[in-house]
Image: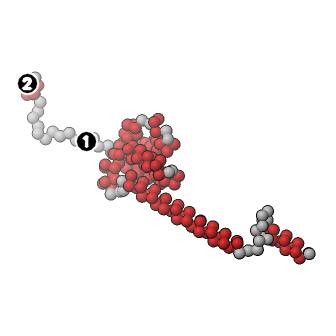
Amino acid sequence: MTEVMRTLPRSRSFRIKPFQFGPLDEACTVLFLERMRVAFQMIWEGRQWELNFSAIYNLAYKLVTGKQGHRLYDLCTSFMRRASRCMREDRFTCFATLIRDLTMYIERTFVSAQRQMLLLDYARVVYESRVAYLWRRVRYVAVKGARVTLWRAGFDEVRFRPGGSGWLAARESFHAHANA
């Protein structure tokens, strides 16, 4: 054992460096992004138990180290924007958390280096702005509906009688009164 130790060079400059990928080629990038998109779609549909999380995390790692973190971040944010339009808050929070867990490496490296918003913070902002927009829309429709109801109440009852259809009912009523 001591002979083996004597034969090894005693260099103090020996360092273990992390492995660095070069930029990914376009075909590989498109394939990885498509796999990530399919995984996000499966989470959207509630089939996350079918996924291999370590393989998907590895894809995200390869995309980020292959200088494609911006494309992965755009994919994550686009899915969160779409999900904010049609999911309830508890389901959306679960969805955003799963996406963040799958792409955790992007938050540790790309997001902090590019000064982007963290994915869960982005999800919260998008959801709150969407809910605020929908409530403004509901309030606008309710106010507009109340104005239309008040406007219609000012018209003659003949025009809006049960079974009548607006101006056709009013025209028939006018002709009936004119002939009498």
- Looking at the image, which residue is at 62% across and 69% down? 146
Quadrant in which the C terminus is drawn: bottom right
- Looking at the image, which residue is at 37% across and 50% down? 69
- Looking at the image, which residue is at 29% across and 43% down? 20
Of the residues shown, which amino acid type is indicated by label 2? Thr
Q: Earlier in the sequence, mark 1 or mark 2?
A: 2
Q: Nearer the viewer, residue 112 or 23?
A: 112
Q: Is residue 63 visible?
A: no
Instruction: For the residues labelled 1 and 2, say whether their Cβ atoms are less than 8 Å apart.
Output: no
The secondary structure type at the circle numbered 1 is: loop
The secondary structure type at the circle numbered 2 is: helix
- Looking at the image, which residue is at 45% across and 58% down? 128
Number of residues whose C-alpha sits closer than 10 Å to that of mark 2, classed few (under 14), some (14–19) or many (20 or more): few
Q: Which mark is residue 2?
A: 2
Of the residues shown, which amino acid type is indicated by label 1? Pro
Q: Which mark is residue 18?
A: 1
Q: Nearer the viewer, residue 172 or 105?
A: 172
Q: CA distance from mark 1 to mark 2?
A: 30 Å
Q: Position of residue 43 (x, y in %)?
A: 47, 42
Q: Nearer the viewer, residue 153 or 1?
A: 153
Residue 95 in the figure: left or right of residue 162: left
Q: Position of residue 13 (x, y in %)?
A: 13, 41
Quadrant in which the N terminus is drawn: top left
Q: Position of residue 28 (x, y in %)?
A: 42, 42
Q: Is residue 155 visible?
A: yes
Up-down: is 50 above or below 175?
above
Q: Which mark is residue 118?
A: none
Q: Position of residue 18 (x, y in %)?
A: 25, 41
Number of residues whose C-alpha sits closer than 10 Å to that of mark 1, classed few (under 14), some (14–19) or many (20 or more): few
